Amino acid sequence: PVPVVAVVGRPNVGKSTLVNRVLGRREAVVLDTPGVTRDRVTYPAEWAGRSFTLVDTGGWEVDVAGLDARVAEQAEVAIDLADVVVFVVDATVGATATDERVVRLLRRSGKPVVLAANKVDGPQLEADAAALWNLGLGEPHPISALHGRGTGDLLDAVLEVM
Ligand code: GDP
Ligand code: MG
């Protein structure tokens, strides 16, 4: 069976951008508005000669009041389906209460997690990524999904636990 790698995180942290980067094409929907990914969308993917199924998550509606709960709900379903979880955090924002909530789900799941500190577009933002050690999920991998910075190392880390 092909392993399932789920990309989870708050709206707008760059999950779909990362999925597109891994696929090497524009397929996952990227917009500035949160909540545009209608459902879990799965894509066949490959890195370093290994095949896996990549899952882009979203599915919550734009509903400010219920947003935290919806993110957590979606994340929980995706985590259940996954062999490996890539948890994406916006390093320029830092960990929010919603992020902490997803961290608790991740811990409970016992699934291997690779922490992606996204939007580290340049070396001046590395310190923001390092601050995410505080989440207790191990090494934050600084990446720029937009520019491709660090995404190879991130995928190597995924393969190691896959
Ligand atoms: P999602 O809601 O988590 O799927 O996030 P998207 O992939 O739709 O991205 C949300 C916004 O963040 C878009 O405007 C992206 O262009 C932007 N974005 C994603 N990755 C990066 C990145 O590495 N650096 C910067 N500066 N912006 C990014
Ligand atoms: Mg998306």
Image (cartoon, rainbow, N blue to C red):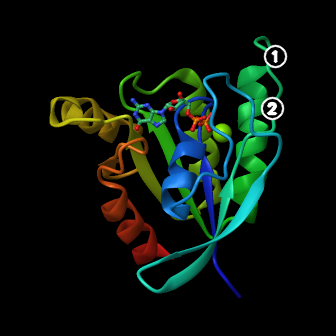
Residue underneath mark 2: 60
Q: Quadrant of residue 80?
A: bottom right
Residue underneath mark 1: 63
- Residue 59: where, in percent of width, then height? 81, 38
Q: What residue is drawn where x is 37% and y is 31%? A: 91
Q: Quadrant of the N terminus?
A: bottom right
Front residue (pair 48, 147): 147
Find numbered disc 1 in the image and state the secondary structure of the residue it sits on.
loop
Q: What residue is drawn where x is 52% and y is 38%? A: 14
Q: Residues within 10 Å of mark 2 (few under 14, many from 20)?
A: many
Give the residue at the far left of this rendering.
124
- Residue 156: where, in percent of width, then height? 36, 70
Give the residue at the far front of this rendering.
25
| Rendered view: 109 above or below 102 | below
**Location of ligand 2 given as a quarter of the image:** top right
Q: Amino acid at mark 2?
A: Trp
Front residue (pair 140, 46): 46
Q: What residue is drawn where x is 71% and y is 47%? A: 57
